[in-house]
Image: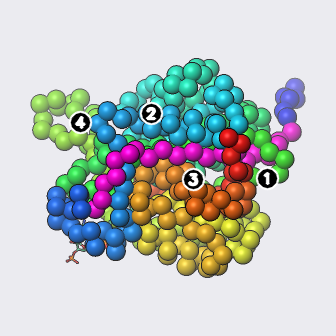
Amino acid sequence: MTLQTTAPRNARILSVGGYRPPRVVPNSEIVDRIDSTDEWIQQRTGIMTRHIASADESLVDMAEKAARVAITRAGLTPEDIDTVIFATITYPYQAPSAATEVLTRLGNTHAAAFDLSAACAGFCYGVALANDLVRNRTANNVLVIGGEKLSDFTDPDDRATAFIFADGAGAVVIGASESVGIAPTVWGANAETRDAITMQPSWIDYKQDPTADIKWPDISQQGQTVFRWAVYEMAPVGLKALEAAGITVDQLDAFIPHQANERIIDSLAKSMKLPDSVAIARDIRTTGNTSAASIPLAMDALLTEHPELHGKTALLIGFGAGLVFAGQVVELPPVPKK
Ligand SMILES: CC(C)(COP(=O)(O)OP(=O)(O)OC[C@H]1O[C@@H](n2cnc3c(N)ncnc32)[C@H](O)[C@@H]1OP(=O)(O)O)[C@@H](O)C(=O)NCCC(=O)NCCS
């Protein structure tokens, strides 16, 4: 028996939307608890301010706002979405998923929906999956959300993380297109460095000994290990993604890497020999590191600042806890329909 299949088609990012919580937290509000300075944080990371959600603003509150902007800008309604992929590591329930909570908020309760755990690479993993779902006609309009409320899982007294992580959500709609709008993804892991970024302790530790004095799970990281890995390993990933897209650095219009540290961004741009004509996203300065949300938020900010980049080519690279990574060249979304 021969099974039936359908001819593949092309996909692209139709729109992007972002949401940043209104409260802006400058370095000066963080430094005392971690014996640091505004100057040190800016020099080592580029971060000046970040957005932190209020106690009663949930991860899904932020995701819903970003999703609604992306859906409207695509000229669609929530009913048109048939798949939701929510990349996050900060939804405080194992089940049901954050993606299905978004569905109920949007009033569309029938679309396929699932969460994706690939930390700061989660958005690029989601773009890879959405591309293949649309290409193979499993889905027509995929909402890919990257969202985090990292303030719930960051110890404000931890010198290694308190100044880096922040809150926010970004979303894109990926749908069918005439031409190739998303090139093949280059992805993988380096799991021997699995302990370089962790969220500890596990919930099982509470279950096994409820009387023990166990702290809330917070992110911890070996900053130098992550820094070295990102700087040395991610430039070849970017170059492979360009090769997979069949373009050279001279044909690239924008570079939108995960916003982990401005020094990492600069180093990658230098190693890949990006010409000055390539616009580089530096949203980290005012948004901090929002993990899965960082690339769609940076994309939204870059397009606001440089509207001429709508429809142009951009290299995305996500990397983080795992350690895992994914990179792809995309055509940036066209000018919003609404
Ligand atoms: C976290 C990070 C900024 C730390 O910078 P670093 O240069 O590696 O810092 P180190 O831990 O080597 O410490 C260097 C010095 O700064 C000091 N220091 C460390 N944290 C500090 C802080 N928060 N404030 C002020 N000083 C600090 C150390 O005590 C040390 O001082 P010394 O030289 O007098 O001994 C950097 O490692 C980094 O950005 N790593 C990547 C993290 C990342 O991107 N994570 C997300 C990935 S998804």
Query: Which of the 4 quarters of the picture holds residue 337?
Result: top right
Type of residue at label 4?
Answer: Asp
The disc at residue 180 is 1
Instruction: Give the left or right position of residue 303, taking residue 60 as reference.
Output: right
* Image coords of residue 157 (percent x, y): 19, 54
Q: Crowdedness of circle 3 by 10 Å Cα count: few (<14), some, many (20+)?
A: many
Rounded to the nearest whole Å, what is the CA distance between mark 2 and mark 4? Answer: 27 Å
Quadrant for the C terminus in the image:
top right
Type of residue at label 1?
Answer: Val
Type of residue at label 3?
Answer: Asp
Type of residue at label 2?
Answer: Val
- Camera-side mark, 3 or 2: 3
Using the image, determine if residue 74 lies above or below residue 289: above
Answer whether residue 16 is magenta in the image. yes
Residue at horizontal 50%, vertical 36%? 65
Residue at horizontal 66%, vertical 29%? 77
- Camera-side mark, 3 or 4: 3
Between residue 249 and residue 95, name the one nearer to us. Answer: 249
Q: Mark 4 points at which residue?
A: 205
Q: Name the residue under label 2.
A: 60
Specify the color scheme. rainbow
Using the image, determine if residue 70 lies above or below residue 112: below
The residue range painted magenta reads: 7-27
Give the mark nearest the N terminus, 2 or 1: 2
> Which is the main secondary structure of the residues drawn in magenta?
strand
Q: Mark 3 points at which residue?
A: 300
* Image coords of residue 141 (percent x, y): 70, 35
Most extreme residue toward the front is 338
Give the mark nearest the N terminus, 2 or 4: 2
- Camera-side mark, 3 or 1: 3
Secondary structure of the residue carrying numbered label 3: helix
Rounded to the nearest whole Å, what is the CA distance between mark 3 and mark 2? Answer: 19 Å
